[in-house]
Amino acid sequence: MLSIKNLHARVEDKTILKGLNLDVKPGEVHAIMGPNGAGKSTLGYVLSGRDGYEVEQGSAELDGHSLFDMETEERARAGLFLAFQYPVEIPGVSNMEFLKASVDAVREARGDSALSSAEFLKLARVVCKQVNLPVEFLKRGVNEGFSGGEKKRNEIMQMILLAPRLCILDETDSGLDIDALKVVADGVNSQRSSDRGFVVVTHYQRLLDYIKPDFVHVLSDGKIVKSGGPELAKELEAQGYSWLADHPDEVP
Ligand code: ADP
Ligand code: MG
Ligand code: MG
């Protein structure tokens, strides 16, 4: 479903990703861990098509379609969803308008008809409840004045409404409290399905107590240097990344 091959990418003058390979099949949850500055967030930005991030070499395909040949909006319509650590605030645009416009665009791309305002409101209320966000948040400006935890809930709400094919969540380095971690974990767990994949980027093993990944990868200096099952995350938590660098073959 997602196939990244030999990806090299740079920010400004600096090459950050140096030959990254990753394959995600439908139904799988992959965790990407790794030391600070390894390029984890860069990977998300490159896949999303953020300005300033340039692909030097390699490919990334979603369901056989090259992501790098698409505009950012087209990637979303193709079923790619990215959640970043700091969601943007859009004052003046109501959360409801924003969510509906996003959902309408994705439905249109799938050949589904647009939902009426009443239909969408009904759906949005159900999802608000699911992520434990009061319905009043639908009327507020997008993320405007939302607390960190509320932004997280809102982001997960967006993910659930969009029903993407592939979700990439970057939770790295964040001071997410345990409640926010659980919101993310519950959101992912409730949306796990045989036709959807997840890539969860996390600096700490803690999140993986709630989301049980099928695969764990270690990203270091722009490449995946080690892959394994959930036990790899535990081992890293116990031993640290520097130990991995010294003993690359001793990690299970
Ligand atoms: P991680 O998410 O794994 O901690 P990042 O992807 O955020 O790592 O960063 C990888 C490297 O890219 C770091 O060395 C960081 O300083 C560098 N970097 C990120 N953004 C920029 C930028 N806009 N200009 C120059 N270097 C950057
Ligand atoms: Mg970082
Ligand atoms: Mg990061």
Image (cartoon, helix red, strand yellow):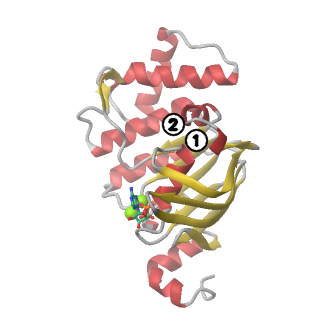
Q: Quadrant of the C terminus?
A: bottom right
The residue depicted at 51 percent of the width and 59 percent of the height is: 10
Residue lying at the far left of the rendered structure: 145
Disc 1 Cβ-to-ligand 3 distance below 8 Å: no
The residue wearing badge 2 is 159
Give the residue drawn at x 70%, y 47%: 61
Location of residue 231 by image quarter? bottom right
Is residue 103 something that shows in the picture? Answer: yes
The residue labelled by disc 1 is 191
State how far apart marks 2 and 1 are (Cα): 9 Å
For residue 37, which quarter of the picture?
Answer: bottom left
Q: Are marks 2 and 1 in contact (CB under 8 Å)?
A: yes
Q: Residues within 10 Å of mark 2 (few under 14, many from 20)?
A: many
Check disc 2 and give the amino acid type.
Met
Residue 65 pos. (x, y %): 73, 41
Asked if residue 27 shows in the view, the reply is: no
Q: Secondary structure at mark 2?
A: helix
Q: In the image, residue 130 lies at what x, y percent?
A: 45, 34
Q: Is residue 132 left or right of residue 80?
A: left
Q: Is mark 2 within 8 Å of ligand 3?
A: no
Compared with 96, 180 (above or below) is below
